Image (cartoon, helix red, strand yellow):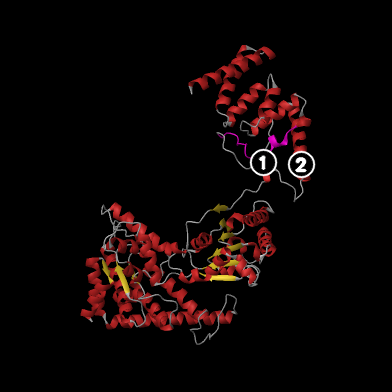
Amino acid sequence: MGTQVARAKCNTTTIARGLHMQWNFSWKDYKTESALLEEANNDPQNAEKQASLLKQMNKHNPGNVVQRVESGKYINNELTIREYIKALYKEDKLDNLALSNVVQVPNLAPVGSGGAGFNAPVRVQFVRHKWENYVILVVVAGILIAVLFSEGRDSSPMPMFNVPSTHKKMNEGNVTFADVKGADEAKMELQEIVEYLRNPAKFQQAGAKLPKGVLMCGPPGTGKTLLARAMAGEAGVGFLYIAGSAFDEVYVGVGSKRVRQLFKEAQECAPCIVFIDEIDAVGNSRENASSKDNTLQQLLTELDGFSSTQGVIVIAATNTPETLDPALVRPGRFDKQVYVQLPDVSGRKQIFDLYLKNVSHNGIDSEVLARSTPGFSGADISQLINASAIKSVVKGKGEITMDLIDEARDDILMGRERRNVIIDEKTRHMTAYHEGGHALVAYLTEGADPVHKATIIQRGSSLGMVKQLPEGDQLSYSRQQMEARLAVLMGGRAAEELIYGRMGTTSGASSDLMQASKLAGKMVREWGFSDKVGLVYVGDRVSPHTEQVIDEEIRNLLQKQFDYAMKVLKDNRHVLDKLAKELLQKETMNGEEIKSLLKTTL
């Protein structure tokens, strides 16, 4: 290393001494240029050092400036390009201007940076006190404009307009269907595509054609991306991944070009799977003309442009299939839809078993966990196990227990506890009655979900909370269940009014009223649970008279369930008092404790 440094210093000194002899400039200039040359050679990616050297060299040897810049060994920025053009002018070589050095994106750094490249056109700025700067500016501007406008749309673009590759080519052979848990139905639907990719000749002999595109839709976190990767692993083919947002355009035509590049590479890699995640970012319905329409139209064209026998399967994922353009999901494009649902009890058990293999635990029953987490997706379960593992480390237990999982689940469902918040006794007392009202109405109302936990400890933005969990997976709800839900939501406000009077009620029921209003609105507008509105689906655009009827029906539904909750609490006032007292003492009660207390009191 020391020898190399010594050689560099020797070469630097020799070059500078040669310049001194050739141009006969002062010894001070020689020392300055020698030092600058040494610094610039030792740090070729520092644009500021390169600019300082070129400015000094331009005083006596502009030819060396031209050679150094055009060598491509050193990073450039606006200042170095300015010195380069000055040198060309002094050497009378403007006719030989190398545009690849003037407009050079990968080797260009912003002024004032240490050397990081940036994708932007060069802005040449000159000091205005010399007349030659104006001449240079006009010449360079004219050349750049002429070149840019002479480029056709189909010709090779200038480097500053290069469209970078935005997709990833992955070798996903290590991921198979065995790694995907809780999505058995989706795996069965996708198996035929895997068989086709394994042996396309068998399908072609039978005259069978598989869909060019498969649209996987479903809630977030259900494993759509993992399923696509597993398909490639099962079939042993290539896997190209790209996000829908990668097609966003800064310049008109860039998004379309990226689509063409993607499908061109897919055809070169066939057989393969092209996976477009969050396709709704580019495939939304074309209601208004925009630049995104060009990208969508190019995508539609590419889906039509390759044959289904080429071995390229396009898979897209979205959480909102209803927003996609109809032309995108018509037969011949994304004509096969696979709905990836939230896992059921058995699916959640499989997912828990998968994640529990990677952590140290004691006494964990995955079936119990699966039954206590209805509505959880695979991503939710992963978060739950990870949060439990973190808690085990923080608390020094070294392994996950059921208590830690319950605590982590409550944090996810109800928010983290805020025990350090100081709450006055009157507020605690009112919160206990409010949450007790929810719990008591839930226990005594047929069709209501069982209470999982009640607390008067502040969680998130709530002073307290009652959490209910269904006994099993729910795919649809009856009118009785919905009205029971409304009654439970009204139970907190009814308890406040019963204990403190109408003028003593607080704003604590704002979240309850919001949830109840949304549910009642859907019952009236979408599900036909209103005799006055009828068995119709009411959209957003309705007549003023219909809107008035809808508002009245929503208010009637809410008032009816409030009156019911008030009656339940009045008839069982002594039970409400005892439950509130118990909450004030324990602060948190689980479902079994609440159930036991109410059974002995009623």
Judged left or right of residue 376, residue 35 is: right
The residue at the point 52 percent across, 62 percent down is 231
Magenta stretch: give its range.
97-113
Bin the neighbour count of mark 1 within 10 Å (Cα to Cα): few under 14, some 14-19, many 20 and up.
some
Determine the secondary structure under disc 1. loop
Determine the secondary structure under disc 2. helix
The answer to whether residue 109 is magenta is yes
Q: Position of residue 207 (x, y in %)?
A: 65, 72
Residue 303 in view here: yes
Residue 553 drawn above or below residue 54: below
Q: Position of residue 235 (x, y in %)?
A: 53, 62
Q: What's the magenta bit mostly, secondary-structure-wise?
A: loop
Residue 129 in view here: no
Q: Position of residue 161 (x, y in %)?
A: 68, 46
Q: Which mark is residue 61?
A: none
Q: What distance separates the C-alpha of mark 1 from that of mark 2?
A: 14 Å
Residue 125 drawn above or below residue 279: above
Residue type at the position of mark 1: Pro
Judged left or right of residue 460, residue 546 is: right
Quadrant of res 410: bottom left
Judged left or right of residue 524, residue 162 is: right
Residue type at the position of mark 2: Val
**View extreme (left): residue:** 600
In this orientation, which residue lies closer to the viewer: 313 or 284?
313
> What residue did someone put label 1 on?
121
> In which quadrant of the rendered image does the C terminus lie?
bottom left
Bin the neighbour count of mark 2 within 10 Å (Cα to Cα): few under 14, some 14-19, many 20 and up.
few
In this orientation, which residue lies closer to the viewer: 309 or 190?
309
> What residue did someone put label 2 on?
147
